[in-house]
Image (tube, rainbow, N blue to C red):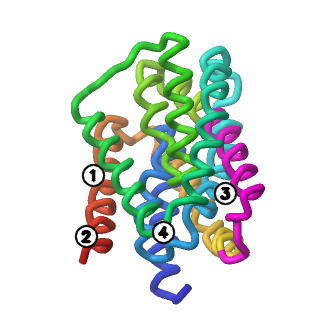
């Protein structure tokens, strides 16, 4: 990893961590396309490891506010999704994984703009957990399905529930990827180098969270992620 690459990835991680703490998701959605552009070998492992640390911090801040019943059913769905996502990582070439990441980001953005609000019925939460497990393990972007199904939760409850889900879910995904032999030393070294940026993002989120407009922040995060996805697609074809 060169100096300029480290700077780009560090800024991305810091902004993503700030978003994760503020609105409950954003690190994976923002970082995955950029990581795939700059250093594909870091995705999805480094993003999942960094996200685990950030979500653990959010969970400590918002402890006691998670929707435990919904969380349980979401994790039931996450498990088969993780297994399917692991198979994709093992089977797909790097180029196809990059296009999958871009497709997940763009699909999530379209659904978000369309204003689709699924019910919070048990079946919907399980299916969202399954989709999140598949997407999160294969691309490190597991936020959109859960953000949609839980979007009617209050701010603290949303952040706590999402963080608990992503912490346990990310550990599931990392365990499966390790068992499949896809977690390399390069991704672990990259995680260590980028950890200070994640810490900086978490610290910045503290004083900024109260001032942020959640809707506008979510829109800005989606726009940044879409821009990264578009560049990623162009890179694969050009």
Q: State the mark number for residue 234.
A: 2
Q: State the mark number for residue 223.
A: 1
Where residue 180 sits in the image (x, y, percent)? Answer: 72, 58
Highlighted range, magenta? 163-186
Where residue 131 sits in the image (x, y, percent)? Answer: 50, 35
Q: Could one spot residue 154 in this view of the protein?
A: yes
Q: Nearer the viewer, mark 2 or mark 1?
A: 2
Q: Is residue 70 magenta?
A: no
Q: Secondary structure at mark 1?
A: helix
Q: Secondary structure at mark 2?
A: helix
Where residue 125 sits in the image (x, y, percent)? Answer: 52, 20
Mark 2 or 1, nearer chain start: 1
Q: Quadrant of residue 101?
A: bottom left
Spatial separation of the CA atoms under disc 4 and disc 2:
15 Å
Q: Nearer the viewer, mark 4 or mark 2?
A: 4
Mark 3 or 1, nearer chain start: 3
Placement of 170 over or under 90, stated as above or below: above
Which residue is the site of mark 3? Answer: 49
Spatial separation of the CA atoms under disc 2 and disc 1:
17 Å
Q: Secondary structure at mark 3?
A: helix
């Amino acid at each position: 990893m060169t100096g300029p690459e480290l700077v780009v990835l560090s800024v991305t991680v810091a902004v993503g961590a700030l978003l994760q703490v503020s609105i409950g998701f954003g690190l994976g959605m923002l970082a995955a396309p950029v990581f795939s552009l700059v250093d594909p070998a870091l995705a999805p492992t480094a993003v999942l490891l960094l996200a685990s640390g950030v979500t653990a911090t959010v969970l400590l801040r918002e402890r006691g506010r998670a929707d435990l019943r919904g969380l349980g059913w979401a994790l039931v769905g996450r498990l088969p999704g993780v297994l399917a996502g692991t198979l994709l990582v093992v089977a797909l070439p790097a180029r196809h994984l990059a296009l999958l990441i871009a497709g997940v980001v763009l699909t999530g953005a379209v659904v978000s703009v369309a204003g689709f609000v699924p019910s919070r019925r048990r079946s919907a939460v399980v299916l969202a957990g399954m989709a999140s497990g598949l997407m999160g393990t294969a691309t490190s972007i597991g936020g959109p399905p859960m953000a949609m199904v839980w979007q009617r939760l209050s701010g603290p409850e949303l952040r706590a529930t999402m963080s608990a889900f992503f912490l346990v879910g990310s550990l599931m995904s990392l365990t499966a990827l390790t068992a499949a032999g896809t977690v390399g030393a390069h991704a672990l070294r990259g995680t260590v180098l980028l950890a200070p940026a994640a810490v900086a993002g978490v610290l910045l989120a503290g004083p900024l969270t109260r001032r942020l407009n959640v809707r506008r922040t979510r829109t800005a995060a989606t726009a940044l992620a879409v821009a990264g996805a578009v560049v990623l697609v162009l890179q694969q074809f050009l």
